[in-house]
Image (cartoon, rainbow, N blue to C red):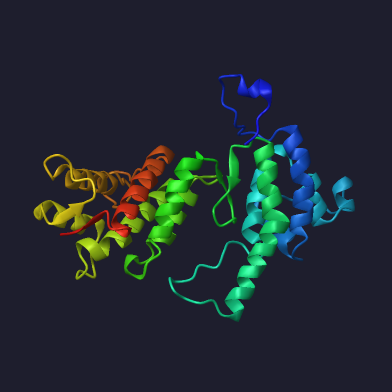
Amino acid sequence: MWTPLSTRQSTGDVLRYDVSPALAAALRPWIDGAVRESSRLADRVLVRCDLFRDTEHGPEAEVDDAEFLAWYTPDERLLDVVDAVLDLLPGAGAVQLPAGHKPGMLEAMAGGLANITYVKHRQPLQQLLADGRSAYTLSPNGRSLVHRVDPAVAALLGTAARVAEQPDRGSASGHLRRAYTAAYALHPEPGRAYSEAIKAVECAAHATVEPNNTKATLGTMLTQLRQHPGQWVVALPGTTGVEGENVVYAMASLLWKGQTSRHGAQQPTREETADEARMAVDLATSLVRWFADGAVRRR
């Protein structure tokens, strides 16, 4: 991301969480063009963002819904509108196919449509957000805005998700990607992010730890790891051969026990915080990759 010389020389945060006047001026034409992709897209964005256009009085009466969204939305609501538009644009995201599956004609057409709309609308938006030094960027599937994270962190998660795209790792990849999106969304959903992170690890570890238990959970897998030391091969075993196992167990246990909203009780249930959810995603990213690529396996 390019930053001005004056910003590079400062010690403050280079990212902006607000919408600068310059970025607002660039986003408005993008919104105008994007919402015209579908006849009903503007109507749905108005409802989703709780924006009301007075069709009888004032200057709003002289414009259509697309113009209203683009030119009359307050600057502080523009990112909400962009986020809603991204979810409704046709062709969002790439078509996910099972390993070894050859795409049919309809799947190939869907993939082509996704690529066309990405180049037409999503790619220019991503560039605008980067040039505006926005703290937000597009999610991996292009359907929402997420907090911008360090490229190395995003790359690690992407690698883990790709490695986990194996039949015997279930839907680990999908859960991990959803956990990331929920944790870093424009309006984060910590509870959902944490839950998806646990599901990602359960899917990735199931075939290794409890392949014959159809009702396995991360909790039951932790019991197996604890009760059968020495049965697991870890790529980095440690000087005594057990440190690696202990680290895997400790990380999985921290992830499992750290979820505060899993069960109800007499006391009010506490939702996970955004920081807790993001750390859970980090833990899940490492665990999913280790189990999926065989860095942790049964002896």
Where is 81 relative to 39, above or below? Answer: above
State the residue in front, 287 or 60. Answer: 287
Left or right of 243, for residue 273: right
The image shows residue 232 at horizontal and vertical percentages of 16, 55
Left or right of 26, for residue 276: left
Left or right of 185, for residue 18: right
Which residue does the image show at 74% across and 65% down from the upper left? Answer: 38
The image shows residue 221 at horizontal and vertical percentages of 20, 57
Where is 13 relative to 36, above or below? Answer: above
Which quadrant of the rendered structure holds the C terminus?
bottom left
State the residue in front, 232 or 135. Answer: 232
Which residue does the image show at 18% across and 45% down from the upper left? Answer: 237
Which quadrant of the rendered structure holds the N terminus?
top right
Q: Is residue 272 visible?
A: no
Left or right of 210, for residue 78: right
The image shows residue 282 at horizontal and vertical percentages of 38, 44
Which residue does the image show at 51% across and 77% down from the upper left? Answer: 102
